Amino acid sequence: MNIVVIGAQWGDEGKGKIVDFLAGDAQAIVRYAGGANAGHTIVIGDKKYALHLVPSGILYKDKTVFLGAGMVIDPEALFTELAMLEERGIEWKGRVFISDRAHIVLPRYRELDKKHDLERKKPIGTTGRGIGITYALKCQRDSIRLADLTWEDKLAELEDEDLQFLKPYAERLLSMKTDITSEMWKLRGKNVLLEGAQGALLDLDLGSYPYVSSGISCSSGAAVGAGMGPRSIDRVLGVFKAYSTRVGNGPMPTEFDEANQSELYHFIRETGHEYGVTTGRPRRCGYLDLVALRYACRSNSIDELVLTHLDVYDTFGEIEACIAYKIDGKTTEDFPASIDELDRAEPVLKKFPGWKTSLRSCRSYEELPANAQAYIEFIEVYSGTGVGIVSVGEDRAQTFIRVNPWNSESAD
Ligand code: GDP
Ligand code: IMO
Ligand code: MG
C-alpha cells in the first residue's frame, strides 16, 4: 500500500511527526519533493530531531529511505544531516538511497536565490536554500541531476567552483544512487510512505502563486517524485494544524492582527513554538482557515485529515475558525487564485466553545472533551473529509488513530 502524507496548509503542519508515527508499519519511506527548505521535527521522549532532506522514517533502524526524483538536493546539507544522525547513534549507511533523477543544488544557486529574492519588489521571503533557482534551471533543462555526475559533457558545462564543490561529494552521492521506479516496483504489495514537504498552499501550481515554493508539494507530486504512476497511490493523508501558520510573505486571510490581537498572536506563537525549523524565522499565526483547508482536500484527493496542535488551544474559553471569505462585499467559500483578491479577503469567523483542559495526555477520541470533539466534527462536515489521526503534543506518543490508514479500520 502506498500512502502519501502531505501538508494541507502552508507547511509546518507536523508532517515529520506524522510520517515518523506511521513509519513503524512501513517498509520504506520516500521524500518526494522540495529540498533543504523543509524542516521536519520528530520528538521521542527527550530526543528531538530536525530533518531537512532525509525522510522522517530514518529513526527506525530497519527502514529503507529514498530521496525522490522530485527533490532538489544540496550535497553539503545532506551530508551535514547524515553526520548529525550518525553522531546521534542513527546508523544510516546502506539504507539511504537517492533517485538518479533528483536534481543537485549548487552553492552559487543559494547565493542567487537570496540575491534574487532581495531584488524583487515584493520578496517572497524564500529560505535562501537555492530551491527556486534549481527548479528553474531544471525547467530550463540546464540543471544537473545525480545521474549526470558521471556524464563528462554535462560536467564540462559547469563552472570550476561547481566542480570543486562537487569533488568531495560525488563518489558518496553516486554510492547512494538508485533507480527509484525499479525500487518502487520491487516494493509492490509492501507498505510505502510518501512524505511531502511544504504544503498544498505552497505548491507551485495549486498554491498561492507566486508566494509558493517551486516544487510539486501537492499529492499529485508524490507519484512523479517516487517514479510511479498516479494509480499506484492508495491513500492521501492531509496534515493540518488546529490553527494556521505561514512563514515568509504572501496572503494569509486569517492571520491574526498583530497590532490589535497582540496577546492572541504571541500566545499561539509561543505555545505552539511557531519558529521555523530551517531559518528560525517567527511564523505568522492565524485562525484555522476552513476555506483553504477544503480547497486543499479537494485539489489533493485527501482521504483523511490528520489534525495536529489541538493542545495549543487548551486554555481558550472560545475558539474561532474561518468558514468563508468576504471579498469586496461578496461572500465566497472558494479559495481564489488571485493574490489581489486573497489579500482583500476578510475572514467570516465562526465561534466554538473551548475545552479549558489539557488534551496532552488524551490517547483516544473518546477521551477528548465534548467541545474538542465538536470542533473536529465541524471541520469534518465542512471539509467533507474525516479526521483519521489526532495529535495533541509534539511527542511521538502524543498521537492517536481513529482510522488506521494502513488498513482503514476505524478505531472509534
Ligand atoms: P513539518 O514541517 O510539517 O514536519 O512541521 P515542523 O516540524 O516544521 O513544525 C511542527 C512543529 O510542531 C514541530 O516543532 C513539532 O515538534 C510540533 N508539533 C507537531 N505536532 C504537534 C502537536 O500536536 N502539538 C504541539 N504542541 N506541537 C506539535
Ligand atoms: P516544511 O516541509 C514552511 C516557504 C518559505 C517561502 C516560500 C518559498 O517544513 O513544511 P523557498 O525557499 O522554498 O523558495 O521559499 O515557501 N517554505 C516553507 N514554509 N514550511 C516549509 O517546509 C517551507 N518550505 C518553503 O518560507 O515563503
Ligand atoms: Mg517544517
Image (tube, rainbow, N blue to C red):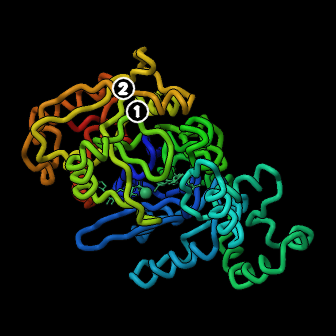
Q: Nearer the viewer, residue 96 or 256?
A: 256
* Image quadrant containing the C terminus: top left
Q: Nearer the viewer, residue 401 or 200?
A: 200
| Local crowd size for mark 2, using a 10 Å CA cut-off: few (<14), some (14–19), many (≥20) | many
Give ligand 3's quarter of the image: bottom left
Instruction: Choose the circle earlier in sequence order: 1 or 2.
Output: 1
Tag of residue 52: none
In screen coordinates, is 177 left or right of 288? right
The residue wearing badge 1 is: 293
Percent position of residue 51, x then y: 45, 66
In screen coordinates, is 120 left or right of 10? right
Percent position of residue 221, x then y: 60, 43
The residue wearing badge 2 is: 383
Percent position of residue 184, x then y: 61, 52
Name the residue furthest top. 330
Which of the 4 image quarters holds residue 230? top right
Q: Residue at x 37, y 41 (%)?
A: 405
Percent position of residue 242, x then y: 28, 41
Q: Residue at x 27, y 59 (%)?
A: 394
Instruction: Tell me, yes or no, whether the two marked residues, 1 and 2, touch with CB atoms within 8 Å.
Output: yes
